[in-house]
Image (tube, rainbow, N blue to C red):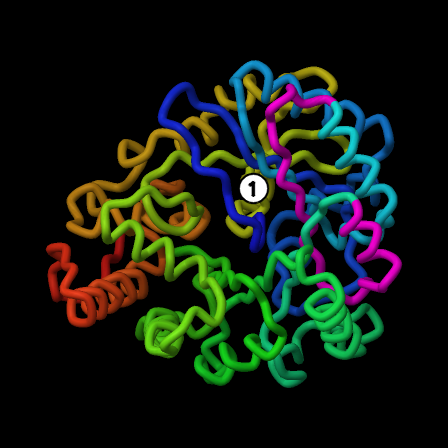
Amino acid sequence: MSGPTAPVPASASPPHFRQFIVKVHGRCNLACRYCYLYEGPDHTWRTRPAAASPEVLTRTAQRIAEHARAHGLTSLSLVLHGGEPLLAGADTLARFTDDVRARVPAGCAVQAAVQTNGTLLTERRVAVLDRHGIRIGISLDGGLPAHNARRLDHAGRPSWPAAVRGARLVAERFPRSYAGILTVVDTTLDPVETYESLLELAPPALDLLLPDGNWSAPPPRWEGARHGAWLCAVFDRWWTAGRRETRVRLFEECLALLLGLPAATESLGLAPFDALVVETDGTIEQVDSLKSAYEGASRTGLDVFRHSFDEALDHPGVAARQAGAASLAQQCRACPLLEVCGGGHYAHRYRAGHGFRNPSVYCADLKIFIRHVAGRLARDTGVARAVPVSSEGVTP
C-alpha cells in the first residue's frame, strides 16, 4: 500500500507504472499484532537483507528513469517504504530521492514520500526530509493512546508516545511536508471518535483502509458488513462538517466516481493499477497487500539487475490488474455498481483454489458504503446517478 500520497492518474495507453514503492529497509522497530507483512502467511522477508544496499538503490533509480523515459512520464510517485524506512536513515532516503530526480528526464516531476510509523521522527530527520522535498505519511490507528494498543515495539511497549510526538512535530513545524495519516479501519473503535481524534493531529489527508483479508482468511469482525457501516458513519461526520476539515481520499474518490470523473485508487474504480514494489534485494514484486493471501503471491521472478520494469508489465498478475473489468468475476461485471466499486481491492478477492477472480470479501460493505454516499450526494446536492437501493452482499 502507498499510504497517503496521492497516486498519479494513469493514462489508458500504453500501460506503464507511475508509482514506485521502494523498500529501503525491510525490518520494523514495531511488532504490530495484526501486521500482514510480518505476521501473515508470507515469510519471504526473512530471507532478504534488512536494508537495501547502495547498489540496489542505484540500480532502482536507473530503472525508474529508464521507465520514465520510455513512456514519456511527466510525473511519477516515489514511495519510500519498509518495514520502517527511517531505520535506513534520513540521509539515505534523501540521497536516493536526489538520485532518482537527477536521472529522470527533464520535465518529469518526482513526487516523493516516506511512509513511517512516526516513532523515529525527530527534528533533525524531518528537517532533512523537508529539505529534500520528501513528504511524510504516518501510519496510526487513531488519535488516542487506546486506539493504538496493538501497535507495540518488540519489547511489548506502546508506540503511541513516540508516534504522536512525531506526528505533532511534522504538523506544527513542517506542515508543508505533512502528507497525512493512514489508518486501518477497526470496527471495535467508535468511528466518529476515531475520526475526530485524528483531526486533532491536523492531517491534510486521511487514508482509511479496510483490513487485509480474503474469502479464505476473512478479516476480524467481518460478518454483518460492519466495516461498511463504520465508513458510512465517518462519511456522514465528514460530509456534514460545513467545511473541509481534511481530505479523506476514499470518500473523495467515491464521490468522483459517482460523478463520472476519473479517480486513481487501489480500492475503488476500474483504472489500471500502476504501482510496483522493489524489495531490499532488488527483486521486483507486486504490491505488499497480496502477501496477505498466500506465500509468494506478490512474486514476479524479476529483479532490477536483470529486468526492466517494462518486463514486469508482462507478468500475468500485473497484466490482470491492468485489464480492468475483464479481470473481474462475472458477478462483478454484472453489478450496477461496477464503475464505482471496480471489484474492490485486488487482494481482498482471493479465495484458495479459485484465485483472485471473485468479488471482494468486502462486497456487502462496499455496496452499503457506495449506496450511502450516492444517497447523500443526491439528497444534499441534487446530483444523482442511478444506483439501486438494494444492499445485499455477494458470496462467490
- Side of 354 relative to 76 (left or right): left
- The residue sitting at 14% across, 59% down in the picture is 384
User: Which amino acid, mark 1?
Assistant: Val
Percent across and percent down for residue 95 are 83, 36
* 158 in relation to 118, above or below: below
Q: Quadrant of residue 77?
A: top right
Percent across and percent down for residue 69 are 59, 16
* 337 in relation to 355, above or below: below
Towards the viewer: 300 or 266 = 266
Towards the viewer: 305 or 161 = 161
- The residue sitting at 36% across, 50% down in the picture is 268
Mark 1 element type? loop
* Local crowd size for mark 1, using a 10 Å CA cut-off: few (<14), some (14–19), many (≥20): some
* 42 in relation to 163, above or below: above
- The residue sitting at 20% across, 47% down in the picture is 331
Span colored in magenta: 103-131
Examine the rendering and report whether any part of residue 210 can be seen. no
Q: Quadrant of residue 64?
A: top right
- Side of 163 relative to 369 (left or right): right
